[in-house]
Image (cartoon, rainbow, N blue to C red):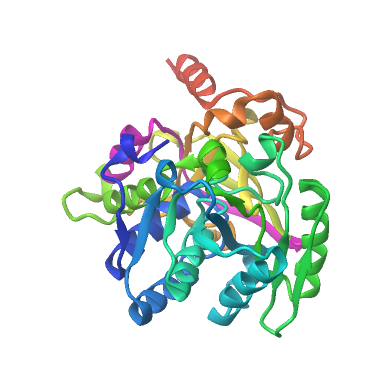
Amino acid sequence: MTAARTGTALTRITEEDIDAIAIGAAVLGTGGGGDPHVGALHAKRAIREHGPVPVVAVRDLDDAGIVAPVGMIGAPSVSIEKIAAAEELVTAIDLLEQGTGQRVAAIMPIEIGGGNSLIPIAAAAERGLPIVDGDAMGRAFPEAQMVTYHLAGLGPGTTVLVDAQGNAVLSRPVSGAWSERLARVLSFEMGGSATMIDYAYPGSVVRDVAIPGTLSTARRIGELLLGAELRDEERIGRMLDELGGTRLFDGKVTEIERAVSGGFTRGRAILAGTGDDRGAGFELDFQNEMLLGRRDGVLAAVTPDLIAVLDQSTGHPITTETLRYGARVTVVAFPCHPQWRTEIGLATAGPQYFGYDVAYEPIEELALRAEEARA
């Protein structure tokens, strides 16, 4: 899933680009990654004050320049009310430089999802640095070790967490799993969310592990869903065509369970079918992000493939913390990046890691089987 497939690559990000990136990132974020509206406000204000942000392609990164992934960690339900200050972003970068003795050359999203695609843009504008057109997930995942760096056998390195009270913690976890454990506890004590930097590596490493073009892809998705050239009923279909996605279900939310637990927003949504899906039911499980979907009890899509919930009329994405009873939605799915379909990728973010007693099956195979069953 790259910019080459979905449109022209970004060369700089202006205030006018932010709304499209926010919409597209929320689709790719599978319901998580933080609130896109809050992230968009951060990015717009920073660009307004400091000017457009230059964009560097993954392939064009300098070998030695340190790339710092900046984002938020915590429960998305908390981040709506506990909004990070711009000072947190600058403090986190300063602390990373102090702790490593190296200057940051570029900022990168750790994930392409919701607010965590926009907070890095704000950080780049604040520090006058370029933003990398890529990320380390190709979607959003709930845990810190669920990144392509980990799949490549790399540790989190020097890790920074900063909160709104001025607390700043620098640590050097021995593994991605320990980074997640430590950061989750700290972010909980910091009020449920915090600014975080981890996996800061030189460009030579980032070129090998990052998933390229994801900010450009997000902008293209946003352009499709916001554009006036398409009617409401055409937008979702056009996006699915361009991304190789699948429409899973049209329905109305009839039940939703959601709670903040262990530093995550966890829950389940039940849908009753509408339109061609009338008479059928659909169930979604989430932990910050949508992880598993079942149609009438039969597996329809599962992590690490992407599952997104969209407003049925506009196609705009609905995050896990804003999904509401009565909403009329369309559930869609997209293939994940091939790195997640490897043995280590599935061990890191596949269904069995999250406790689901199902085997991973690619969305392409599940969709074909469902189509044959309904024929």
For image coordinates 54% across by 52% down, the residue present is 31
Asked whether residue 328 appears in the rendered view, the answer is no
Residue 24 lies left or right of residue 290; in this view the side is left
- Please determine whether, in this image, residue 164 is positioned above or below residue 124: below
Residue 177 position in % (x across, y down): 80, 47
Front one among 35 and 62: 62
Residue 185 lies left or right of residue 23; in this view the side is right
* Residue 237 highlighted magenta (yes or no): yes
Work out which quarter of the rendered image holds the C terminus and state it. top left
Residue 163 position in % (x across, y down): 69, 77
Residue 360 position in % (x across, y down): 66, 25
- Please determine whether, in this image, residue 158 is positioned above or below residue 359: below
For image coordinates 67% across by 63% down, the residue present is 73
* Residue situated furthest left in the rendering: 229
Front one among 281 and 105: 105
Q: Which residues are magenta?
A: 235-263
Quarter of image, res 304: top right
- Please determine whether, in this image, residue 310 is positioned above or below residue 46: above
Work out which quarter of the rendered image holds the N terminus and state it. top left
For image coordinates 82% across by 64% down, the residue present is 185
